[in-house]
Amino acid sequence: MNYEELGFAKVDHHRPRRKGFPETIFGQGKTPAQIAGIAKSLADKGQPVLVTRASLEAFRAVKKVLKKAKWHEVARMITENSKQKAASRKRIITVITAGTADLPVAEEAAVTTEFLGNKVERIFDVGVAGIHRLIKNLDRIKKGRVVIVVAGMEGALPSVVGGLIDKPIIAVPTSVGYGASFKGLSALLTMMNSCAPGIGVVNIDNGFGAAVLAHTIISAK
């Protein structure tokens, strides 16, 4: 179980053997130089690079050491996966948002999903305030083998979707909302108390975690 000592980080090069995908760099709280150092360490071992919660400054630092790195502005992510194969059309994960304000978290889930080799069906702004928008897109939603539902405010959308389809649903509460939403706690509790079966819930704003769970579900043998 080897790792590389960088002084400020111990890069886990053994993770692909254990998990099937490399270590992900959580950018928040790290300096651009630290992020670039970890990214180069991973790339030097032939591993693809995924950075979440990154800044534009961090991307510029990574770009200096990894020329093919890509910046995903809405998702706030950096990727470098030049050896990636085409996504499998059989491995479709649907990502839904209740509102446009949920897009950063949804795109974090979508970009991670694609990074892991899956096809993504994006369906945005179909929240319960206009339920007809959801119904009209039901056929597209059903294409996914797993459905990620991202919602803030009161967090009701996963329950509605859960009552309409027979696919596993991963609910992602976001910190979007006015004061009584308590920065996503209200949505989190609503999702955890859903009466619709087949729903799992990840942490507030954790689009990355939802994507990894969805990938794990459809990859299971």
Image (cartoon, rainbow, N blue to C red):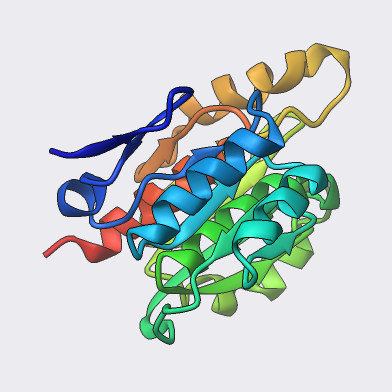
Is residue 88 toward the left or the right of residue 26 in the image?
left
214 sits to left or right of 129: left
- The one nearer the camera, 210 or 75, is 75
Percent x, y for residue 28? 65, 29
157 and 59: which one is in front? Answer: 59
Q: Is 212 positioned to the left or the right of 190 in the image?
A: left
Task: Point out residue 213 in the picture as x, y percentages from the top left corner.
Answer: 36, 48
Compared to residue 29, the image places residue 97 above or below, namely below
The percent position of residue 153, horizontal first and vertical second, equals 77, 31
Q: How many labels does the image show?
A: 0
Residue 215's x, y, as percent? 35, 59
Which residue is rendered at x = 48% and y = 62% of the image? 113
* Depth order, front residue of 85/149: 85
9 is higher (above) or lower (below) than 85: above
Q: Is residue 150 left or right of residue 85?
A: right
Residue at 47% of width from left, 45% of height from top?
A: 210
User: Looking at the image, which is closer to me, 20 or 31?
Assistant: 31
Farthest-out residue, right: 178
Whether residue 149 is visible: yes
Q: In which quarter of the image is residue 83?
A: bottom left
Q: Is residue 14 above or below residue 145?
A: above
Q: Is residue 162 visible?
A: no
Quarter of the picture holding the N terminus: top left
The quarter in which the C terminus is drawn is bottom left
Q: Which residue is drawn at 84% across and 45% down?
A: 101
Picture residue at 37% right of the left edge, 45% below the top: 23
